[in-house]
Image (tube, grey):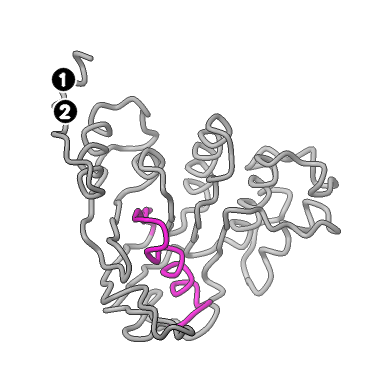
Amino acid sequence: MAESVTLGRVSKSYKTAQGTLSVLDNVQLHISPGECVALLGPSGCGKSTLLRLIAGLDQPSAGGVRLGDRIVHEVDPRCAVMFQEPRLFPWQTIEQNVALGARRRKVARPPTQLLSLVGLDDFASAFPHQLSGGMAQRAALARALVGEPEVLLLDEPFAALDAFTRMQMQDLLAEACRTVQPTVVMVTHDIDEALYLADRIVILGQRPATIVATVDVPQPRPRDRGDTTLALLRAQILTHFGFSHAAPTERQINAG
């Protein structure tokens, strides 16, 4: 069952040779069970750090993170993380790699079922070097979902893929999430990707990052990539990154 995620006045800083590096400052956010939220912001503003705090891979310097009603103190088995690189073990088959995602989980789908879901039925016995980059990311997605996580954390999982493969993976992720139904928190630099997949987009400012805006995406899924409403929202989001040209109206978009 999907779990809520709550960030309560979360701040994070690190000690460096030059002093203290503040990354996040007083971040407050509540994500409802089953919601998909995309995090947008400048490079290095702390988006990936925020994911690490939710997963329990790191601890906040101030404030707290809760999954449901429990504070996150350590690596939380309710979370699964998918990174930009597949990070598959080269000496194990694809099925064995996917099965690793079910460890420490009481309820898990068979790896073969997830491989079927991501279209890798015929590659269960293959090794990672025998897969293309897109196929390897499919395997990584299957591994993240096999344990039926309550919270799925995505750290720019499709950034290294070509545009066509990236769109295929976005569709695959949307379909997989409809099947497994976790809460999703996704870091991306791609505004169109965020608009296509997320229920809500959270925009972070420069480091030390705080939330500067949130944008709801009301369109039902599956979405049309050419939807004029998404284009209007895209123009709205761009203003938060210093692109101050007036947003086009729906009539202007249709006329173009």
Label 1 belongs to which residue? 252
Q: Outermost residue toward the top?
A: 255
Please give left or right for residue 194 compared with residue 98 in the image.
Answer: left
| Label 2 SS | loop
From this view, report whether residue 116 is shown above or below residue 251.
below
Residue at image location 78% in from the left, 60% down from the top: 89
Which stretch is magenta? 34-59
Residue 120 screen position, x and y as percent = 72, 40
From this view, report whether residue 199 is shown above or below residue 32.
above
Residue 202 screen position, x and y as percent = 29, 56
Foreground of the two, 41 or 172: 41
Residue 52 screen position, x and y as percent = 48, 71
Residue 146 screen position, x and y as percent = 63, 57
Q: Could one spot residue 108 in this view of the protein?
A: yes
Q: How many labels does the image show?
A: 2
Residue type at tag 2: Pro
Magenta stretch: includes residue 55:
yes
Q: Are marks 1 and 2 in contact (CB under 8 Å)?
A: yes
Label 2 belongs to which residue? 248
The numbered disc on residue 102 is none
Crowding near the residue tagged with mark 2, few <14, some 14–19, many ≥20 C-alpha atoms within 10 Å: some
Foreground of the two, 240 or 10: 240
